[in-house]
Image: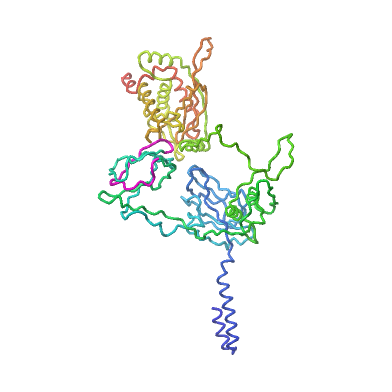
Amino acid sequence: MMATSLFRSAIKGGLSKQILNKTIHSLLKLERLCIHTSSFLNVKGQEIKMPSLSPTMTEGNIVKWLKKEGDTIAAGDVLCEIQTDKAVMAFETEEEGILAKILVPDDAKEIKVGSLIALMVAEGEDWKTVEMPDSAGAPSAPTTEIQAEESGQPSGGNTPGTEIRMPSLSPTMSEGTIIKWYKKAGDKVAPGDVLCDIQTDKAVMVFETEEEGILAKILVGDDTKNVKVGDLIALMVAEGEDWTDVQVPGEKKVASSAPKKESPELKIQTKATSESVTRHAYDGYSPAVRSLLELYAIDGKSVKGTGKLGKLLKGDVLNYIDQNKLTVKPPTSVPLPGETTKSTPSVSSPVSRPAKGPGFTDIPLSGMRMTIAKRLTESKTMIPHAYATVESNIDSLLGLRKQLKSAGINVSVNDFIIKAVAVALKKCPLVNCHYVKDQVVLQQTADISVAVATDSGLITPIVTNANNKELDEISSEIKELAGRARKGKLQLHEFQGGSFTISNLGMFDITEFSAIINPPQCGILAIGSGRPVIALNGKPKTILTATLSYDARAISESAASDFLETVQGLLQTPASLLMTASTNRRASN
């Protein structure tokens, strides 16, 4: 150390002991100061985390960084390309500064959303001395929170129980409602026993256990809504153990590594709505900071900046908003043309809404409707829809249906359509396909999904191998499936899958419409109602319009045209639909 070497030199030089002690004390103090403050010489970086680039994205792969360390970044620049669960997308930044450190390299896979992937500093700061945050070693965890080492204390008795958690009963299920328990505490449970009914985002399904033992404790009772998949719902013990003394495990708690303390100097007084909020000039800030200041009507001088020379960063403003629990300020009211205002405040008061009363009803969205909205949005966003329409003369079909009815066989026009579409899919196999992971997967069977409206939303029960079934068999199967669909009693395999979908609104007098593709399927046929028109010979005829929506990535225009032409021919010559594949084989022999 510097003080030790100086001590030895001073002794040889003959300095007095008193002067020497004072000198060494000052040097040791200076040395300690340098050691303990050296970290402040580093630049505190602004964190860049893995973004969520699609509604269903939970993790992504970094394909390639388009910026390198030391590059200057402006708002709107593309930092890197990220492969989501849907496509490869560009990650644009809203900040400006210098890219200081890339923590996750090219071709890094399965990076969780929210994980730390890079650091940025303000322009003019030394990016080479950027300070690594404590969470850099574990980017998947938030920087302000850590998991507590100890779990919560177990409660209850002394018998350890087997945990039963909310299952995932459909691929899109994230939470469910426990409708009814069929077992009660103390009942014996064997593999295959039904524990309870669970309402998913699609239907009410039974939860069968694969374990055996005794149901010891039900933690989530009947009619409990919004239970997350994976949540603990019950406990079970082995047969012979004391189920009344079961131990309820404690849940892990999240403890903050730096507990937030209420800072009195950061609190602001809430003004009455009649007082105007003064807008401040926002020049000199980055676009992201300026946008936040304007949106929340914040005076930038009241926020402490942590950048170089006290520069205000986006994170500083976000922390200020969070600490003070600010909300977005309403825009300035603008009078309509011709209106006169006595005094126009700089910020308008919140929009007044009618009080709830007999004329207003709030309808909560069911889990099924939220899932439908999500999937339809993904479909229209990610799938290039193409459309083709064909008109068919169904007079012969209506005549044949009338003859069958007189013979005691009741079938609908929709049953003919299902059979015609299934036969056409076998004749035009390029349309009978799925699009999965950038590949076209041809389907071996013609499984027709039929759209059925229920109180909870639209569901599509499946008629499997429809091309090999008789018309009356299709009719009875559709009635049975539709009835159970409206009661929410369909099994998972009865409405998930299918190779092609039919949506028929003819019974509602809709003459023509287009439908949205249900991925991973590549086609859906929208059927309108039959309508009378006058033919060229002056005689009336009944025309039915069918519109095909197809995935242009998987189905070509020629394949779509061949399919519609085949459907048209089958509907105009419906006698061929009375024969199954086995009948056709016998006829050919």
Q: Position of residue 308 (x, y in %)?
A: 63, 61
**Color encoding of the figure:** rainbow
Furthest toward the front, the residue is 357
Would you say residue 201 sits in the magenta stretch? yes
Dividing the image into 4 quarters, which one contains the N terminus? bottom right
From this view, report whether residue 124 is shown above or below residue 431: below
Q: Is residue 206 left or right of residue 303?
A: left
Q: Within the image, what quadrant is residue 149 found in?
A: bottom left
Q: Is residue 181 left or right of residue 12?
A: left
Would you say residue 17 sits in the magenta stretch? no
From this view, report whether residue 249 is shown above or below residue 57: below
Q: Within the image, what quadrant is residue 222 found in?
A: top left
Furthest toward the bottom, the residue is 14
Q: Is residue 523 left or right of residue 191?
A: right
Furthest toward the top, the residue is 538
Q: Is residue 507 left or right of residue 299?
A: left
Q: In percent of the image, x 45 and y 22: which residue is there?
A: 567
Q: How many marks?
A: 0
Q: Within the image, what quadrant is residue 483 found in?
A: top left
Camera-nearest residue between 446 and 510: 510
Camera-nearest residue between 49 and 454: 454
Q: Position of residue 509 (x, y in %)?
A: 50, 21
Camera-nearest residue between 97 and 196: 196
Q: Position of residue 75 (x, y in %)?
A: 62, 50
Q: Position of residue 395 (x, y in %)?
A: 46, 14
Dividing the image into 4 quarters, which one contains the C terminus? top left
Camera-nearest residue between 452 and 212: 212
* Residue range corresponding to the magenta coloring: 200-222
Furthest toward the left, the residue is 240
Q: In percent of the image, x 38 and y 43: which residue is there?
A: 221
From this view, report whether residue 579 is shown above or below residue 174: above
